[in-house]
Amino acid sequence: MPTKGFKLHRAWLIAGVTFLTLIAAAAFRSTTSALFMPLEMHFGWTRTDTSLAVTVNLIFYGLTAPFAAVFMERFTIRRTVMIALTLIGLGTGLTLFMTEVWQLVLYWGVFVGLGTGALALVFASVVANRWFETRRGLITGIFSAAYATGQLLFLPLITNLVMQSGWQIGSLVVTVFVFAIMPIFFFVFKEKPADVGLLPFGATEPRVEEQAPRTVRATLSTLRDAFKVKAFWVLAGTFFVCGWTTNGLIGAHFIPAAHDHGMPATTAASLLAVVGIFDFVGTIASGWLTDKVDPKLLLVFYYGLRGLALFTVPFVLGPTAELPLWFFIVFYGLDWIATVPPTIALTRKYFGLAKSGVVYGWVFASHMIGAAVAAAYAGMIRDTLGDYFIAWITAAFLCLFAASSMFLIRDKSRGKSIQ
């Protein structure tokens, strides 16, 4: 008995395997921009062609998320995640045999989009809700940092492999990693603390749980109810901007934009990987702060800082601009995904624990729709005007708008809730 307090709670092992699984999705998400130019050169495709595949991917990614929460409640998390990993592995691996643009759209867009959508941060939110009573902000920050970790690990590796051996080897590395994760997840992951005779981390008594939505109809009904709450529109709108300025613009177009200014692809990839280092630190710190500071104020600061950083990009991007570009690398990196923990916290606050997974799924869908629009928009701007200047400035203004919109949310006690 005296050593019981020093025993590591199984929740942390579940968190570890969840983090590892999220990296598998990040392995694909963080490397698409490194494959743009090699694919275009190999097949003779345009930036609009490759951007279309990413746009379709982001749409499926976003729209799968709210329904993934339902699938996890109804068919178990384990089954849902195993199917998702299979889709990512197949969608990435089959690109080795493609010859037409429509195949890239199918494999990257549909297969990988569905798989990564099921492994989006909705998955992380459900795990955090089930296994943690306290430290939810911190654990959400750690899960959010999985994208940064995947970016840090895979982006420089795959960029160098692509430059030396061709784009096919980059796709192969991601495929092998994803399939290697599957048996680890299958044997380690458990659905709920009660399955192994435990309480959630930090809980002192069994939790009285509300029934989470378990059908498509219930999911759509939850969305309809959420429409009546102003907080939903603010969170969905700001997350639309978050997706626009991260996955859609920087994630998809930073490397080709830097290349347009004469920066070698390997240098641009290395800088983007460094963003991942600061992202890792900033996101975990954001999770810790979310447990202590008003999440609305955090989001005002994050979006405002991101907007200022984006304004600098077209003026510092270039072959010899590594030093001035560090302003962007540091400050943008610190709040790349720092918006996630406070957004999830506000979703729990306004919509209750049971429905927060599904509601956040719809908020996250808005994030990925914003990313999809941005990926297509930036690609068309580049093909039409010859550079990305308008794309950078548009994103910067959107961030400042998102920061100011947080003041529209009233305290829950004075507003509506669908709990």
Image (cartoon, rainbow, N blue to C red):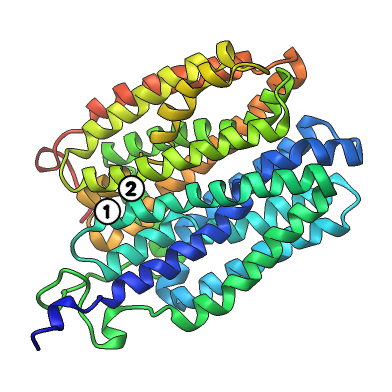
At horizontal 38% and vertical 33% (from top left) the residue drawn is 238
- Say if residue 215 shows up in the picture: no
What secondary structure is found at the residue carrying circle 1? helix
Is residue 259 something that shows in the picture?
yes
For the N terminus, the image quarter is bottom left
Q: Position of residue 5 (x, y in %)?
A: 13, 77
In the rendered structure, the answer to whether residue 285 lies left or right of residue 261 reads left
Residue positioned 17% across, 33% down in the render:
410
Dot 2 surroundings within 10 Å: few (below 14), some, or many (20 or more)? many
State the CA–CA distance, disc 2 to disc 1: 6 Å
Residue 388 is situated, as x and y percent measured from the top left of the image, at: 65, 18
Q: Position of residue 97 (x, y in %)?
A: 88, 59
Q: Nearer the viewer, residue 123 or 201?
A: 201
- Residue 272 location, x and y as percent? 57, 35
From the viewer's perspective, tell me whether residue 98 is left or right of residue 364: right
Corner quadrant of residue 132: bottom left
- In the figure, is residue 101 to the left or right of 152? right
Q: Which residue is mark 1?
A: 138
Mark 2 — residue? Answer: 284
Choose between 106 and 210: the one closer to the eye. Answer: 106
Crowding at mark 1 (Cα within 10 Å: few <14, some 14-19, many 20+)? many
Residue 130 disc label:
none
Circles 2 and 1, Cβ within 8 Å, touching? The answer is: yes
Say which of 147 and 384 sits in front.
Answer: 147
Residue under the point 32% across and 25% down? 403
Label 2 or label 1, whichever comes before in sequence order? 1
Indicate whether 371 appears above or below 65: above
Three-letter amino acid code at disc 2? Ile
